[in-house]
Amino acid sequence: MKQLTGNEIRELFISYFRTQGHMVEPSAPLVPIDDDSLLWINSGVATLKKYFDGRVIPDNPKIVNAQKAIRTNDIENVGFTARHHTFFEMLGNFSIGDYFKEGAIKYAWDFLTNSEWIGFDEDLLYVTIHPEDEDAYDIWRNVIGLSPERIIRIEGNFWDIGEGPCGPNSEIFYDRGPEFEFDTPAEEMYPGGENERYLEIWNLVFSEFNHNKDGSYTPLPKKNIDTGMGLERMASITQEVPTNFDTDLFTPILSRIETVSGRKYGQSEDTDVAFKVISDHIRTVSFAVADGALPSNEGRGYVLRRLIRRAVRFSKELDIERAFMYELADPVAEVMHGFYPNVTERLSFIRDVIRKEEERFLATLDEGIQIYEQVREKAKAGGGVISGHDAFRLYDTYGFPYELTKEYAENDGLEVDEEGFVEEMKQQRERARNARKAGESMQVQSETLAGLTAQSEFTGYHSLRESGRLLYIVQDDQAVDSATEGTVELIFDRTPFYATSGGQVADKGRISNEEAELQVESVYRAPNGQNVHVARIESGTVKSGETFTLDVLKDSRDFITKNHTATHLLHQALKDVLGDHVNQAGSLVEKERLRFDFSHLEGLSDDEIERIETIVNEKIYSNMNVEISEMPIGQAKEKGAMALFGEKYGDVVRVVDIDQYSVELCGGIHVRNTGEIGLFKIVSETGIGAGVRRIEAVTSRYAVNLYKEKEATLASISGRLKVRENQVEKRVDSLLDENRSLQQKIKELQASRQDEKLADVTGDIKEIGGVPVLSKEVPADDAKELRATMDRIKSRAQDAIIALGAVNDGKVSLVVTVPKELTDRFKAGEIMKGMASTVEGKGGGRPDMAQGGGTAPENITNALQFVEDYIKSSQ
Ligand code: ATP
Ligand code: MG
């Protein structure tokens, strides 16, 4: 066995399969593209679904990749097992209807045991198979020559995630020796059991059935191979270290944590768990942010938030008291730079995002403690037990680990319902698993379109009208020779109709010949790359083999192209104004408007929007030429072309160059000169999820229409104000002034009415033992207003002791004054204490003036009565 670094293993794997005729697929971003069913890319096959379910036919049916993956279902294991991460890399080889079980097994065995490649000792390898998979058994036993006791039959070895391809699998295990048995129970001590001795390194999936909608299984027309090997696990074996964390993929991160904390890795089991959790989570978060995800309260963003919180709370084990995670992004970028340069490229943004989130959490940690305190009071009032539900809520919402809740509880002499907590955790895992199962399923292979191989040429870049021969008609998922009614799907040898892609919508238009008339409703791309026209038959019969005229609706196409070029200008203007971190997160280019989603943390200010709009319009006024050319990808990169995130490009790419201002790889249709766009106007800017903003804009005719609407609004306002348009502002200003002074007058009137009422109040003054006393409930919105009322009454009854109360929203406000000359006999503070306690509240103040309040409005009469009693008893 060779001593290999993580990078070397990755390279070796790819070059092995390349020499076996596989094409290399790049590592796709962790945030799935065009796939709402998955939260994260969680395996190598997840990015290749389109090939597996037949939507797209690959150039080469043999594929190899090194794919980054995030698995949050393994989070509870991270730090506690040697082999689980939330972020890891999966090395995989795939066959789309090419080689099957025997090929896959032979490749795997050759790669692992051949001394030119990995060179494992054969005697240390075990495999598991599905109990009924006699083919796999036979290949392992007779083709590879494994002895029967090394082939273990395990019921669970069947890969099935609902509708779509599925089949048995076979896993390969490496025996790390008896010293890794620790105190594992004997019944788990076998390859496939829950132990650290037999390490699962590679899973070979043989998908040979279609799991149909109705739950039945039928053999697949094309059998596929999908495999996944864990890079970090392989590294731990070849580097002969006890866990994945001790490999060169992690040690630079661990040593940075040592520097930050002043603690050493490898000193105690508890602190090691913290080292492992933090080093794992920082990789996940750094990569996810590099790929466009951001912390938030839901979905993907919530996963990042939880990971950062989990890492921060484990940092307490290392006595780290400050934001520090963001500094660890540096070693992550360094270690991975060779294969994943985008982490380095976006490093300062990644650091920023993590630091902000950490600081926020350090602040909410206090919030968590407050929530704990509420929970504690509830438990004290109840049976002295913190419910599993509350412990789970603290854990899940406030990032409060169960252990911490338990520690606090013990301190407070309380217990925690552990069973209840475990049950809640189980339910959450169940929910996650169901969500995953639902999410992972693939569409069922559509054989009809996949079988149509004759090519179709797209001529629409230069023409709007074409005569094309009808190659295929598909109706109700069946290829037919002719059709007379309903909706059909048509493929021609050539077409000017653009199929929906890259955000640009499909063309509209008509298809016709002497015998038939059709209306095109949509156009999409078939697995073999042809443009499929979904069209409604309006009259006649369509027959394959015949020639048709294909007419694209010019008006719609013209405005689409204006909006597409404007989108490119907008993209670059956003970068100019907001910074280079702005990346396209989605776009929609239609006839009437364009929509552009991009990564940015905050909402845009009016000034920023104004500047962006101005830049785009300036580019339009300066009549820039749009040059479109095809060139090798390397050359395009040299030109500085922006490649869209996660988009896959061939060797030769199409480059849209707007006079060097904006250079993008793009397959869409554009104007020849920016002047054609005419005018650009942003309609709205909104947030559509954490860190993703959306701009909607209009151009040309639709921008003019927007201005016309605004003009009409202005005209209608000036009509109603009965002034000329240029006088509108002045008139509005004077109306606002008038309004303000009217409001002032109303206030004054109200006050004087109040005064009149108060004059009545003074009639309620009683003489108690020669002392004038007024004790009364009055209307007042709050304590401030009550004080003002008091001041007014006092000015009319200067020698009286006055106590006022008011009730609002179930709360009582109280105020008392005692004339200076009476304060040696009666103290306002004392009167208030008695009043306030009567309404279950508090109060106090100086001898001549006191304030207070309470929560029992039903006792206000008693509180006011108290004043009179107090004065009587003090005489
Ligand atoms: P395990 O049972 O050990 O959790 P698995 O059966 O979930 O593994 P697969 O889904 O078959 O794993 O994934 C294929 C390979 O990817 C595994 O053989 C392993 O090498 C690696 N792998 C899977 N999950 C993880 C993880 N959480 N961290 C690191 N590597 C992993
Ligand atoms: Mg697993």
Image: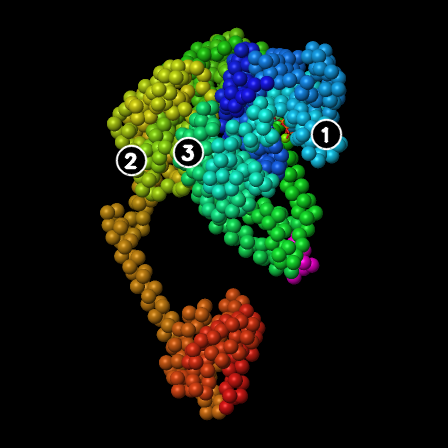
Q: Earlier in the sequence, mark 1 or mark 2?
A: 1
**Residue 851, x across and y down, in percent:** 46, 74
- Name the quarter showing ligand 1: top right
Q: Which residue is mark 1?
A: 189
Q: CA distance from mark 3 to mark 2?
A: 30 Å
Quadrant for residue 198, please give it: top right
Q: Which residues are magenta?
A: 381-387
Give the residue drawn at x 43%, y 15%. Answer: 651
* Residue 521 on image: x %, y %: 49, 23
Residue beneath the point at 42% across and 80% down: 848
The kind of residue tagged 3 is Leu
Q: Which residue is mark 2?
A: 614
Q: Secondary structure at mark 2?
A: helix
Q: Quick one: label 1 or label 3, which is nearer the N terminus? A: 1
For marks 1 and 3, give the CA distance: 43 Å
Residue 347 marker = 3
Most extreme residue toward the bottom is 770
Is ligand 1 less than 8 Å from the beta carbon at label 2?
no
Q: Residues within 10 Å of mark 2 (few under 14, many from 20)?
A: some
Image location (x, y in percent) of residue 129: 71, 21
Q: Secondary structure at mark 1?
A: loop
Q: Is residue 785 above or below residue 494?
A: below
Image position of 326 with respect to 746: above or below: above
Q: Quadrant of residue 744?
A: bottom left
